[in-house]
Amino acid sequence: MDMRDETARPGIGRVQRLQVLRSVPMGLILGHPESEVLLPTRNVPANAAIGDWLEVFVHGDSEDRPIATTERPIAQVGEFARLVVVSVGAHGAFLDWGLAKDLLLPFPLQRERVRPGESVVVRVLLDEVSGRPIATAKLERFLEDPPADLREGQAVELLLYEETDLGTKAIVDGRFGGLLYFEPGREAPAVGAFETGYVQRIRKDGKVDLTLTPTGRAAVENARDVVLEALARSGGRLGLSDASPPEAIRRTLGLSKKAFKRAIGALYRERRIRIGEDSTESVGPLGSPRGERD
C-alpha cells in the first residue's frame, strides 16, 4: 500500500485556519479560489460570516473529496496516538479517532490482527492512492533520531507501544524511540499507557534507555517530596531512619533505601527534619528552617 507521512493535498489531515469565501446550500465554502473545501451545514458555527477565519480539520469524504469539520480528531497526520478499535471490515480495522467517520487501519499496516474493543498505538498518515488519512501500527520508520540536546536524567513523556524481552518500546515526546526496561519490584505499565519517564542512558549508537524512576537531581527532589508528604500525613513522625531495612522503606514509601537516604540527607541539611535511630521527625511545622540531628 502506497503511503506517505505528509499531505497529498494542501491541508488534508491537519487542523488549520481557513477563511469563509461564500455560503452555499450545503454549508460554507472555505479556503481560497485555487483550493476550496466545503464545511457542511451541521458543522457551521453560529454567526459565522463571509470573511471570517475558522479553525477546521480537513479530511476526505466517501468520494475522496476534501471536506472540513469543526470536530477535532485525537491525532492528525504526522502524530502518534492510542486509539480504540471500533470494528473490523474487509480491508482492515476501523479506529475511533474522535470524528464521525472512523479511521482505517489496513491489514497490511497492522503488526498483528486487532479486535473490536482493543487499543492500538498508531501513526496517522496519508494513503497516496486515496489521499485519505489512514493509520499504521508499524511505527519504527517514523521515529526520529534523538535530539542533540537530550540529556541523561531529563524528564520525558512516553507512549508505550511494544513489549520485548527486556522491556517496553516507547515513543518519547511524540518524536523518537526508546526502551523502558523492566524494573525489579515494579509492575510494568501496559502497552498503550502514557507515562512520565526519565532518560537513563544515551548509548553511543543513539539508542535511548528509559526508566520511570527519576535519576540524578530529579530523583532526590522526587524522593524528598515523598518523605515530606509522608511526614505530613503521619503527624510529623515516620518510623523509618537511615538504619531501617530496605524492605520497610519500600513498603512504606515506595522508595529504595538509597533514594530515601539521599532525601532525608537533603532535608536534614535544610534543617527541616531530625533523624533518630529508628525514626525521622519534622522540626516544628514542615518547612521550618531549623533542625538538628540526634
Image: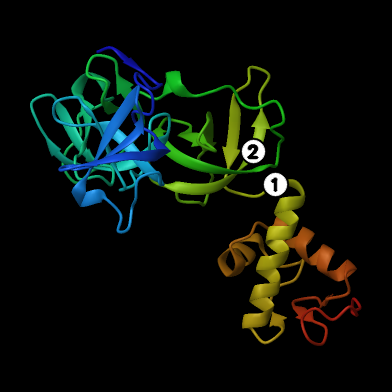
Separation (CA) of disc 2 from disc 1: 8 Å
Amino acid type of the residue tagged 2 in the rendering: Val
Q: Nearer the viewer, residue 166 or 153?
A: 153
Q: Vertical placement of 241 versus 262: above or below? A: below
The C terminus lies in which quarter of the figure?
bottom right
Using the rendered view, name the quadrant where residue 285 is placed: bottom right
Residue 287 picture location, percent across and down: 80, 78
Q: Which circle marks residue 215 in the picture?
A: 1
Residue 106 picture location, percent across and down: 21, 24
Q: Contact (CB < 8 A) between labels 2 and 1?
A: yes
Using the rendered view, name the quadrant where residue 207 is placed: top right
Residue 44 picture location, percent across and down: 27, 50
Amino acid type of the residue tagged 1 in the rendering: Thr
Residue at (17% x, 32% y) in the render: 93
Q: Vertical placement of 190 versus 125: above or below? A: below
Q: Vertical placement of 247 versus 109: above or below? A: below
User: In the rendered image, is residue 179 in sight?
Assistant: yes
Q: Is residue 63 left or right of residue 171?
A: left
Q: Which residue of the protein is positioned furthest toward the left in this rendering?
A: 90
The residue under label 2 is: 199
Residue 196 picture location, percent across and down: 55, 49
Residue at (45% x, 51% y) in the render: 187
Mark 1: secondary structure: loop
Mark 2: secondary structure: strand
Q: Nearer the viewer, residue 65 or 4?
A: 65
Residue at (24% x, 13% y) in the render: 1
Q: Nearer the viewer, residue 289 or 266?
A: 289
Residue at (64% x, 75% y) in the render: 230
Q: Nearer the viewer, residue 292 or 13?
A: 13
Q: Is residue 208 left or right of residue 187?
A: right
